[in-house]
Image: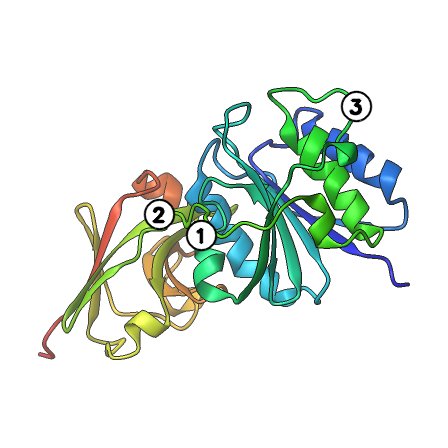
Amino acid sequence: MASRLITLTTDFGLVDSYVAAMKGVILSISPGCQIIDISHDIEPQNIQQAGFVLASVVGYYPEGTIHVAVVDPGVGTARALLAVEMDGHIYLAPDNGLLGVLYEKRSISKICKIENKSLYMPDVSRTFHGRDILAPVAGHLANGLPLDEVGSEVTKYNKGDFVHPIISPDAIRGSIVYRDHFGNLMTNISKNDLESFDPVLVEVQTGYTKIKGLCQSYSDVEKGELLCLIGSAGYLEIAQREGSASDKLRFPIGTEVEVTLKASS
């Protein structure tokens, strides 16, 4: 049997021992699995950002991959933990809307509430369900445990509140949902949303900043200039050539972005 892949997406950062603890639990149960870090730099408690980042990469992983996502402001409360099968992948996450964008893009086969306490760590902390519940469940699933055995199937779940852009014939209103390591500002406006827009006539405005046209690459502008283009994840992004748009503009996550069509001169 081929070793199972397990991915981790959290807001834990890498300064503390939280990620290492989760990996230790997983490997103690399933020593042959492979653990891949998607990101541990999700902004603290930013559920929507975690869902966006996870959704942008899961399509590159093979069927059978187990994705563990922990951004959990409600840890220790009555919120449920879920095991979800979609398109041959299994997702383990709190029922707080984190998987909402994936529910929309992928086909759900089954959703189970994680409640089989025999799979948990012996002492469950009220503040670290990632280590004490999700990590051991991931390890057992990697060893071949059927999804049904983690708990009962459910039909009611938090579908999330991923903010979709508002689209009209000559304008799209979206928002910044993520900033990457390079300082590029990712929006929730997809390549498909912009299909009917002439890239030459597009104007992107956020705050008092206006950027004209969609570029094909960062080198289309001079060093230090701001630009807009469709990034590798398929979404509109605001960037600065050989610089950080995030540092230059200092726009927080959630800042409105408006795309309009300007008449040709």
| Residue 23 percent location from the top left of the image | 77, 37
How far is disc 2 from disc 1 in space, using C-alphas?
Answer: 7 Å
Judged left or right of residue 244, residue 135 is right
Three-letter amino acid code at disc 2?
Asp
Kindly identify which residue carries mark 2: 161
- Asked if residue 244 shows in the view, the reply is no
| Residue 238 percent location from the top left of the image | 35, 56
| Residue 132 percent location from the top left of the image | 71, 29
Three-letter amino acid code at disc 3?
Pro
Front position in the image: 112 or 61: 112
Front position in the image: 202 or 131: 131
Label 3's element? loop
Foreground label between 2 and 3 = 3
Judged left or right of residue 49, residue 137 is right
Which badge, 2 or 1, comes first in the chain's sequence?
1
Kindly identify which residue carries mark 3: 122
Question: Where residue 100 is drawn, which disc sits there?
Answer: 1
User: Residues at badges 2 and 3 in contact (C-beta under 8 Å)?
Assistant: no
How far is disc 3 from disc 1 in space, using C-alphas?
Answer: 31 Å
* Vertical arrangement, residue 180 with respect to residue 264, above or below: above
- Asked if residue 175 shows in the view, the reply is yes
User: Residues at badges 2 and 1 in contact (C-beta under 8 Å)?
Assistant: yes
In the picture, the quarter occupied by the N terminus is bottom right
Front position in the image: 59 or 84: 84
Judged left or right of residue 82, residue 74 is left
